[in-house]
Image: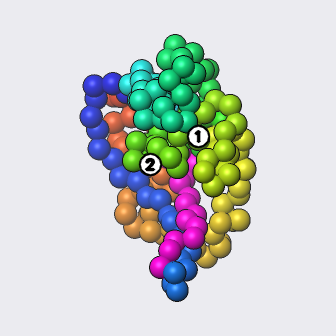
Amino acid sequence: ITGIEYAYNTSIVFKFYIDIKERYITRINAHFPAGYLRFITESRTGSGVIDLICNVMENDCVEIYGEDVFDATNCRERYTALPNSTGPQYYIDGDSKGCRTLHGQFAIINPQGHCAHLSFEPLADPNGEIKCQESQNRQVLELFTQDELDRFERFQIRNGIDPEIGHDLDTCAELNLWCSE
């Protein structure tokens, strides 16, 4: 969406694994409701997002891609050809706009850690990880217990968020956005 501001509430559940002795977060599990992922990936596909991702790759990721390798036109064409998300659960960890949009934001703050994730070709980051290429298709029950998900759903309901939709935006028709079936 370009030139339109709107506010909405959503809820996301996180689970942090912490090494208390080393004072370090070792892993973070996150669950974004599928309805919210669909909304966010389908509403963030305009030229502003394309420019953001390709500009980050061109300007912030020079060490990764090299000045002679990057092609802005090719970037825009390849990004535009990607699906918004992958699979029926709207995964944003695979070869999609959603994954690159997420890691594009991270790359602005931490280019060394995230620029490789923006690549259209498999490229390992400094930790040897390759992201935004193939979804892991993780099921939410691999990351959270049923009890944790039930508590999350009750939290959403108490706060006026339909768990099937994942947000409370009520002007979807006015903005010509998908919000619910």
- If you read the primary sequence from the N terminus, does the residue marked by circle 2 or circle 1 appear first? 2
Number of residue marks: 2
Which residue does the image show at 55% across and 36% down from the upper left?
Answer: 64
Which residue does the image show at 66% across and 39% down from the upper left?
Answer: 123
Nearer to me, 153 or 70: 70
Q: Magenta residues, as a range?
A: 23-41
Q: Quadrant of the N terminus?
A: top left
- Up the image or down, 81 lies above or below 93; here it is above
Q: Position of residue 56 (x, y in %)?
A: 43, 32
Q: Where is residue 163 in the image (x, y as percent from the top left)?
A: 51, 56
Read off the residue under disc 2. Answer: 110
What amino acid type should be assigned to the residue bearing mark 2? Asn
- Up the image or down, 99 lies above or below 150; here it is above
Q: Residue 90 lies in magenta, yes or no?
A: no
Q: In this view, does 159 lie to the left or right of 151?
A: left
Residue 79 location, quadrant: top right
* Secondary structure state at the residue bearing disc 2: loop
Let me know if residue 164 appears in the view.
Answer: no
What amino acid type should be assigned to the residue bearing mark 1? Ala
Decide: few, some or many residues near mark 1? Use Cα within 10 Å; few <14, some 14-19, many ≥20: many
Q: Residue 30 lies in magenta, yes or no?
A: yes
Nearer to me, 3 or 82: 82
